[in-house]
Image (cartoon, grey):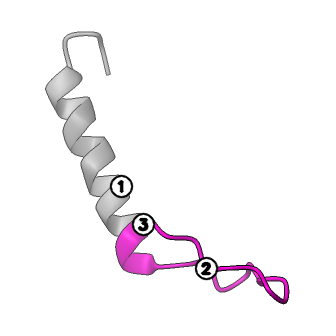
Amino acid sequence: MGASDATKFTAAVEEMTKRAKELGPSPLRKREPGQKEAVA
């Protein structure tokens, strides 16, 4: 993407963020006892 593709970049970032939120927390990451859940 070039410098003139700011709109395209913004759309791509928003789509990736949406997908990540839909997937939820990583099943591979285990919380330590007493560790609070991350809030996004």
Residue type of the residue flagged with mark 3: Ala
Whole-percent x, y for residue 36 in the image: 67, 79
At horizontal 27% and vertical 43% (from top left) the residue drawn is 12
What range of the chain is rendered magenta? 21-40
SS label for mark 1: helix
Compared to 37, does 3 lie above or below? above
Whole-percent x, y for residue 24 in the image: 47, 79
Residue type of the residue flagged with mark 1: Met
How crowded pointer 3 is (Cα within 10 Å; few <14, some 14-19, many 20+) is rated as: few
Q: CA distance from mark 3 to mark 2?
A: 16 Å
Q: Is residue 27 magenta?
A: yes
At horizontal 21% and vertical 22% (from top left) the residue drawn is 6
Residue underneath mark 3: 20
Q: Which mark is residue 2?
A: none
Residue underneath mark 2: 37
Q: In front: 11, or 33?
A: 33
Residue underneath mark 1: 16
- Give the quadrant of residue 18: bottom left
